[in-house]
Amino acid sequence: MKRKGDIDQIDSKIICVLQKDGRMPNTEIAKKLNIAESTVRNRLKRLLNEKIIQVVAVGDPHKLGFGIAGTMKIAIDMKKSAETISQLKKIDQIWYIALATGGTDLDIEFNVNSLEEFKNLVILQVNQIDGVIKTESSVIVEYIKRRYDWGTGQNHPNP
């Protein structure tokens, strides 16, 4: 019996297939992996319910009409981290927040429509949150390499 959050080679192979084509039907995944469609269906349901995977469409923010995509590194007062992170999660333009190591504590990614919205996000919203010590923003000018099938190569832990 699998514990919550555990994945095996079959789960891993299903994930790899979906990383290449998140819209592939369960029947096609089953054929490709030589397993029953019901196995794919049940495993996908568990992987989604346990939030091990998320199947979404990924677009290029510039091509979707956002004027500015960017990243921000944030140093925070760790004693106030829960409330600081809670406030950051409420900002619609921020779509990614990660606790990180290095010179700053949080890495975030955001999409905004204009320099005015960027200024409001960085200066008037993020820097005003209690617990934020320092921010460093970077605007993405061009995506050079951007892929989401990173688990399908030779370095995959469960080939």
Image (cartoon, helix red, strand yellow):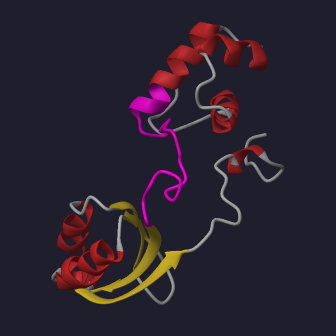
Residue 48 quadrant: top left
Q: How many marks?
A: 0
Between 17 and 80, the residue placed more toward the observer is 17
- Does the magenta-highlighted stretch encompass residue 62? yes
* Magenta-drawn stretch, dominant element (helix, strand or loop): loop
- Percent x, y for residue 84? 21, 74
Residue 58 colored in magenta in the image: yes
Of 147 and 152, the residue lying toward us: 147
Left or right placement of residue 26 versus residue 103 in this view:
right
Which residue shows up at 79% across the image and 40% down it? 159
- Residue farthest toward the right in the current orientation of the protein: 154
Q: Quadrant of residue 34?
A: top right
**Residue visible at 69% across and 37% down in the picture:** 20
Q: Is residue 110 above or below residue 26?
A: below
The segment highlighted magenta reads 46-67
Say whether residue 131 is visible: no
* x then y, percent, for residue 128: 17, 84
User: Which residue occupies 51% across, 85% down?
Assistant: 102
- Residues 152 and 57: in front is 57
Q: Residue at x 53, y 38 (%)?
A: 6
Residue 43 quadrant: top right
- Residue 12 location, x and y as percent? 66, 35
In this rendering, position of residue 103 left or right of residue 76:
right
Q: Position of residue 86 (x, y in %)?
A: 21, 65
Residue 126 in sight from this viewpoint: yes
Q: Is residue 20 above or below residue 140?
A: above
Q: Is residue 126 left or right of residue 58?
A: left
